[in-house]
Image (cartoon, helix red, strand yellow):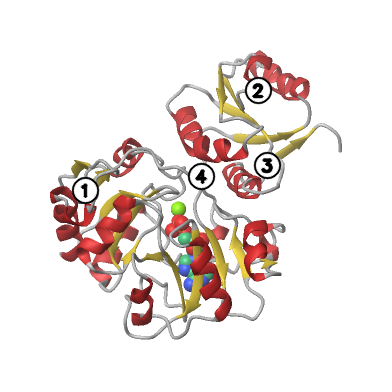
Amino acid sequence: MKTNVWAVDKLVDKLESYPQIIQAADYLKNNEVIAFPTETVYGLGGNAENSDAVAKIFAAKGRPSDNPLIIHIAETSQLNDFVTEVPAKAASLMEHFWPGPLTIIFKKKEGKLSELATAGLSTVAVRMPNHPVALGLIKACGLPIAAPSANTSGKPSPTLARHVFEDLNGRIAGIVDGGPTGVGVESTVIDCTDEIPAILRPGGVTKEQIEAVIGEVSVDPALKNSEAAPKSPGMKYRHYAPDAPFYLVEGSHAFLQKLVDEKRREGRKVGVLTTAEAAGDYQADLVLACGRRGELETVATSLYETLRAFNDSEVEVIFSETFPEVGVGVAIMNRLSKAAGNQVIYEKS
Ligand code: AMP
Ligand code: MG
């Protein structure tokens, strides 16, 4: 299949009537799948009402079929078509964080969406992305759009159109290139079907921000305990992984350097994931600064690009610093732990 690439300036007014967006929207209406930028990562979108379209998303990514998709909308009125009710706390969250990186789980109205999109669950995950290209595209086709990240399943999510092209060229109908995404980690997923909402996946909106709006929320215990079954099916899979073995290192820079030296003495090429503040402290085959530790948002923005850059290099093993689990640091550490398959090396035990 030929993969079209449409370059679109996200600053153009009324993107929903822009020729390239209309062309991409026509593919969506014809149940083909299209990658597009959101403020978190690039998504791979398809008509959520049509199972042929949704099956193409799973096939292109190689995604396990028990992992449901997030439905993307551009107007809150679209919700009425496929959710049974909007609880008061969900309504407050929508008002504060939509459009934005917060996915809300609602009870599903049966018979409207493809069963494949929701993996047969009685609930549905929905978000309104805060990106003019995503919103323009959804408005132009007038459909709810099921969209996971536009990467091959298991790989780091794409934050540039080039990453999508590398993974999916020839497997999808097109890519709308709207430049780099911003937040860099996926949306926070919150289940609002119970009285006390529960965070199932940490992401671009922090627990602190959510609690400031609706009060106490719980956190799925599986996020801390890798033995427990996660409430969000996708959280059980290894994810975001670079090709080389990847270890998190909890300790001093000198300790991490010692680990690097040991591997290099064995003749291995070694990569280090650090930040701008400490990049000069390490000697390795490839030292990559992922944003600035002093501003964790910049680490989130660069995270997947950095993991992909290791793949483009010759390194055979990667050691990464850890980050404080505050604010967006919770999402960063969730993704890094998954990339590492929970392998952490501690300086002190
Ligand atoms: P992705 O599309 O890769 O960003 O992943 C979407 C995440 O939302 C996955 O972890 C899914 O398992 C989760 N998800 C989607 N729908 C539901 C749902 N109805 N209930 C719980 N988790 C969901
Ligand atoms: Mg994903």
Residue 168 location (% of width, % of height): 29, 44
Badge 1 density bin: few <14, some 14–19, many ≥20, Cα 10 Å: many
Residue 115 visible? The answer is no
Q: Which mark is residue 240?
A: 4
- Comparing marks 3 and 2, which lies closer to the viewer? 2
Instruction: Name the side, left or right, on which 103 lies relative to 327.
Output: left
Q: Secondary structure at mark 1?
A: strand
Give the mark, 4 or 2, whose residue is nearer the N terminus: 4
Front-lying residue, 302 or 10: 10
Task: Give the amino acid type for the residue marked by disc 1 in the picture.
Answer: Gly
Residue 214 appears in the rendering: yes
Sooner in the amino-acid sequence: mark 1 or mark 4: 1
Q: Is mark 1 within 8 Å of ligand 1?
A: no
Quadrant of the image for the C terminus?
top right
CB contact under 8 Å: marks 1 and 2: no
Q: Which numbered dot is residue 343?
A: 3
